[in-house]
C-alpha cells in the first residue's frame, strides 16, 4: 500500500486521504461541556425514564468550580423485583477485578463471590474468596462454575474476552457479563474498530492501516508529519505512541515491527493527532439497551504534569466535570448507540460494558479508543459510587434482558483513586518487595490490590507494575484526594512510585506530601 488505507469493504483500495467518519444525521456534532448552569442529572433522567431501555440515574455533575460539593441524590422509588445472582465468579487478577468483587459482594442477595485467580489482597475483601485458576483456562473455569453453582460470571480483562472465554462459558449454559470474541474485537483490533467507526459514522480521527514495516514507513514518507502510532492488537495499554516529530513517529513504527509488543504489533494503525481533554464513558449493555455510568478521567502518563511514557493508568477520578448531563446524552446518541447498532448489524450480540475513550476537541468529540471491559483504574474509582442494584443489573445484561433490571442508583459525591506502582514501571519492574499496610478501610476509603501475591509465609509482596489502588470518596474532589493520599501514606513497599498530582484538573489545593 503506497498512499493511504484500503477503504472499508474495498481491500487494496488506495487513497491519499485518511479514513474519516461522516457525521450521522441528527447527531450532536459537539458535546456540551460542563461549565455551570448545564442540565442536571435529574433533568436528564426525567427525560429518559426507565422502561424498555433502562438508564442510569447519576448524581448531579460538579459545576465548573471543582470544589463545590455535589448535591444529594434523591431517594429512589420502590425497587423493581429483579433476579439477583447469589453466587458470582469474577475472572481476573488485578485491581479492577478486586474492585468488582468488592462492589458485587456488598449487593443485597449476593451470598458469595470468587475471584479467579485473584491476587495477594483478594482474601482481605469481605465476602470474596480467591480461586487459583488462570483467567484463560476456560475448561477449569467452567468446571469451577458448575461445582459452585455460579449464577453470574463477570470477566474483567480484555485478553480472555478476546480469546473467547465468554463464548465458552455461555456454551456451558452460564450467564456471562462480557462480550464474545467477536465483540471483543472493539479492543483487540484497532483496525477492526476503526473500520466499524467509519462505517457507522462515529466521530474519530483520520487513520491509515499498515500491514508491515514498509507500508507504514512509506505512508510516513508520503505524509511528512507526526502521527499517532498504535499497535493493532492488545498491548496492555502501552501500544500507543503520540509522536511529536517525524523521527519519533519513525522510531515508534520500527519498535512495533521489531517486536516490542509481540503479536499485538503484527500490524499497526497510524492516526492523525488530536488535542483536547480526555474523558472515559462506560455503558452497561444487554446488546440492545444500555445504562450509562458517570464519566471518569484517568491519568495515563507516568510523570507528574502528564509527562513521560504511557502506562495502564496512574490514577483517576469521577464524576469528570468535563461532561454534564446534556454532554453525556450527546455521547449516547453520537457514539454509543451507533456503535451498538453497528455491532448488531454485524450479527454481534454484545453483552457487557462498552468503554469509549473520548477526546473533546475544538471541532467536536472524537473516539480515540474503544475497550471491551471496564477501564483500570476507572473501575476502582467508579465501583464505590455504584448502588446495591449492580449485581442485578449485570445479571440482566448477561441474560440479554436489561428491561428486567432495577434502576442503578449512584451515590452522591466524588471518588478519587491514586495508584502505587513498582520501581521501574512502566518498564522492567521489581518484584518480591514486601507490602506493609496500616490502612484501615472504611465506607469512604478502599485499598484494592493489583500486582501483588501472597507468599507461603503470609507476606504480601509486589508481583506486577501497578501494585495498589487507594480510593476515597468525599463531598468534593479536594477532600476525596486528601483522603486517597492520606490512605496512601499508610502503605509502603520498597521503590513505591506514585504521582502527587492526580486530579490536578479538579483540585484547588495540592495534597500534603507523604511522610
Image (cartoon, grey):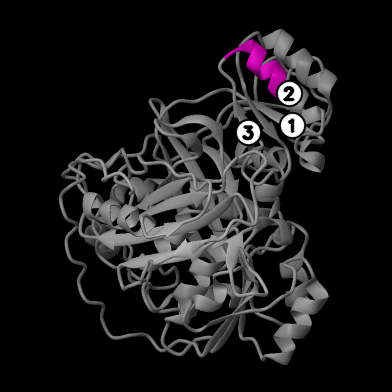
Where's residue 187, x and y in %?
65, 48
Closer to the camera, 414 or 426? 426
Residue named by callout 1: 268
Distance of label 2 from label 3 (alpha carbons): 10 Å
**Residue 155 is one of the magenta-drawn residues:** no
Q: Within 10 Å of the Cα at label 2, are there few (<14), some (14-19), or many (20+) other Cα atoms?
A: many
Q: Within 10 Å of the Cα at label 1, are there few (<14), some (14-19), or many (20+) other Cα atoms?
A: many
2 and 1 marks in contact (CB < 8 Å):
yes
Residue named by callout 3: 240
Where's residue 273, x and y in %?
54, 23
In the image, taking residue 435 as reference, residue 28 lies left or right, namely left
Element type where label 2 sits in the image: helix
Tag shown at residue 217: none
In the image, taking residue 130 as reference, residue 275 lies left or right, namely left
Residue named by callout 2: 253
Q: Image quarter for residue 142?
A: bottom right
Q: Earlier in the sequence, mark 3 or mark 1?
A: 3
- Establish if 228 lies above or below 34: above
Q: Magenta segment range? A: 245-252
Amino acid at each position: 500500500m503506497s498512499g493511504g488505507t484500503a477503504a472499508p469493504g474495498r481491500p487494496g483500495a488506495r487513497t491519499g486521504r485518511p479514513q474519516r467518519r461522516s457525521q450521522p444525521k441528527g447527531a450532536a456534532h459537539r458535546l456540551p461541556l460542563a461549565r455551570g448552569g448545564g442540565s442536571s442529572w435529574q433533568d436528564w433522567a426525567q427525560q429518559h425514564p426507565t422502561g424498555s431501555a433502562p438508564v442510569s440515574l447519576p448524581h448531579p455533575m460538579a459545576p465548573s468550580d471543582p470544589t463545590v460539593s455535589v448535591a444529594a441524590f434523591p431517594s429512589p422509588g420502590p425497587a423493581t423485583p429483579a433476579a439477583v445472582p447469589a453466587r458470582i465468579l469474577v475472572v481476573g487478577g488485578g485491581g479492577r477485578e478486586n474492585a468488582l468483587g468488592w462492589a458485587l459482594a456488598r449487593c443485597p442477595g449476593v451470598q458469595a463471590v470468587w475471584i479467579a485467580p485473584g491476587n495477594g489482597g483478594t482474601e482481605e475483601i469481605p465476602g470474596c474468596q480467591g480461586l487459583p485458576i488462570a483467567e484463560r483456562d476456560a475448561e477449569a473455569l467452567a468446571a469451577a462454575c458448575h461445582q459452585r453453582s455460579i449464577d453470574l460470571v463477570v470477566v474483567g480483562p480484555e485478553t480472555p474476552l478476546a480469546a473467547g472465554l465468554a463464548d465458552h462459558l455461555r456454551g456451558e449454559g452460564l450467564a456471562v457479563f462480557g462480550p464474545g470474541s467477536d465483540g471483543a474485537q472493539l479492543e483487540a483490533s484497532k483496525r477492526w474498530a476503526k473500520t466499524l467507526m467509519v462505517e457507522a459514522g462515529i466521530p474519530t480521527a483520520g487513520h491509515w492501516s499498515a500491514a508491515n514495516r514498509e507500508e507504514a514507513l512509506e505512508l510516513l514518507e508520503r505524509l511528512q508529519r507526526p502521527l499517532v502510532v498504535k499497535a493493532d492488537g492488545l498491548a496492555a495499554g502501552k501500544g500507543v505512541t503520540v509522536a511529536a516529530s517525524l523521527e519519533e513517529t519513525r522510531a515508534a513504527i520500527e519498535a512495533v515491527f521489531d517486536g516490542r509488543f509481540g503479536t499485538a504489533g503484527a500490524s499497526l494503525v497510524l492516526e492523525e493527532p488530536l488535542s483536547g481533554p480526555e474523558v472515559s464513558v462506560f455503558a452497561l449493555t444487554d446488546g440492545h439497551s444500555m445504562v450509562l455510568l458517570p464519566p471518569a478521567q484517568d491519568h495515563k502518563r507516568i510523570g507528574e504534569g502528564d509527562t513521560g511514557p504511557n502506562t495502564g493508568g496512574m490514577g483517576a477520578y469521577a464524576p469528570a466535570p468535563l461532561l454534564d448531563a446534556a454532554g453525556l446524552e450527546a455521547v449516547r446518541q453520537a457514539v454509543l448507540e451507533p456503535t451498538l447498532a453497528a455491532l448488531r448489524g454485524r450479527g454481534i450480540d454484545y453483552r457487557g460494558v462498552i468503554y469509549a475513550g473520548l477526546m473533546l476537541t475544538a471541532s467536536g468529540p472524537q473516539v480515540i479508543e474503544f475497550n471491551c471491559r471496564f477501564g483500570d483504574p476507572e473501575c476502582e474509582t467508579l465501583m464505590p459510587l455504584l448502588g446495591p442494584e449492580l449485581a442485578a443489573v449485570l445479571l440482566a445484561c448477561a441474560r440479554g434482558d436489561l428491561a428486567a433490571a432495577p434502576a442503578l442508583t449512584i451515590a452522591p459525591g466524588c471518588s478519587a483513586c491514586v495508584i502505587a506502582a513498582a520501581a521501574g514501571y512502566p518498564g522492567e519492574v521489581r518484584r518480591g518487595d514486601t507490602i506493609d499496610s496500616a490502612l484501615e478501610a472504611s465506607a469512604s476509603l478502599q485499598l484494592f490490590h493489583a500486582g501483588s501475591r501472597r507468599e507461603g509465609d503470609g507476606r504480601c509482596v509486589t508481583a506486577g507494575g501497578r501494585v495498589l489502588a487507594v480510593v476515597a470518596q468525599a463531598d468534593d474532589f479536594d477532600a476525596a484526594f486528601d483522603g486517597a493520599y492520606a490512605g496512601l501514606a499508610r502503605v509502603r513497599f520498597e521503590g513505591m512510585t506514585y504521582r502527587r498530582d492526580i486530579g490536578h484538573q479538579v483540585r484547588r489545593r495540592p495534597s500534603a506530601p507523604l511522610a
